[in-house]
C-alpha cells in the first residue's frame, strides 16, 4: 500500500508541476469597486490591493482592464492552491519514504 501511495503522490506532483507551468501571468491581491463619494455611489473606480515584500500596495485599475486583472488574480489563487497541495504531498511522500526505510 505504501509504495502504491508513493507512486500516486509522485504522479499527482507531476500533474501539479504541469498545471503550474500552464498558468501564465498572475497578480496577487483583491480587486474592489470603490467610490469617490461612497454616500452617493458616485465616481466609481477599481482598486487592486495586495501585500508584497511586507509592504501594502494599491493599484488603480482602468475599467476596461478589470476582466484581465480578474483573470490574473484567478491565476495567482490557482497557483497558491496548487503549491500548497504540492507541499502537503511532498511532506506525505517524505514521511512514507522514511517509514519504508525504517521497516526495511
Image: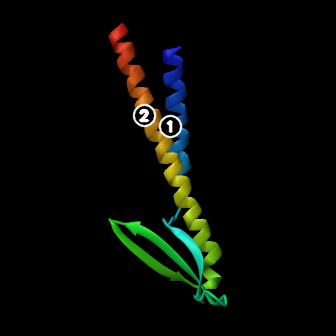
User: At which x and y percent is residue 60?
Assistant: 51, 83
- Helix, strand or loop at label 2? It is helix
Task: Give the image quarter of residue 11.
Answer: top right
User: At which x and y percent is residue 50?
Assistant: 45, 69
The first of marks 2 and 1 along the sequence is: 1
Residue depicted at 41% across the width and 32% down the height: 91
33 or 99: nearer the viewer: 33
Compared to 44, does 10 lie above or below? above
Q: Residues within 10 Å of mark 1 (few under 14, many from 20)?
A: some
Which of labels 2 and 1 is toward the front? Answer: 2
User: At which x and y percent is residue 104?
Assistant: 35, 7
60 or 42: nearer the viewer: 42
Disc 2 and disc 1 in contact, CB within 8 angstroms: yes
Compared to 8, does 4 lie above or below? above
Circle on res. 13: 1
Residue depicted at 47% across the width and 34% down the height: 89
Task: Give the image quarter of residue 87.
Answer: top left
Q: Residues within 10 Å of mark 2 (few under 14, many from 20)?
A: some
- Helix, strand or loop at label 1? It is helix
Left or right, residue 91 beside residue 17: left
Task: Give the image quarter of residue 58.
Answer: bottom left
Q: CA distance from mark 2 to mark 1?
A: 8 Å
Q: Which residue is mark 2?
A: 90
Amino acid at each position: 500500500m505504501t509504495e502504491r501511495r508513493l507512486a500516486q503522490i509522485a504522479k499527482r506532483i507531476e500533474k501539479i508541476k504541469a498545471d503550474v507551468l500552464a498558468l501564465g501571468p498572475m497578480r496577487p491581491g483583491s480587486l474592489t469597486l470603490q467610490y469617490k463619494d461612497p454616500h452617493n455611489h458616485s465616481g466609481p473606480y477599481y482598486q487592486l490591493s495586495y501585500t508584497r515584500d511586507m509592504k501594502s500596495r494599491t493599484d488603480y485599475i482602468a475599467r476596461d482592464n478589470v476582466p484581465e486583472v480578474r483573470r490574473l488574480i484567478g491565476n495567482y489563487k490557482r497557483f497558491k492552491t496548487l503549491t500548497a497541495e504540492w507541499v502537503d504531498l511532498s511532506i506525505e511522500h517524505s514521511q512514507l519514504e522514511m517509514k519504508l526505510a525504517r521497516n526495511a
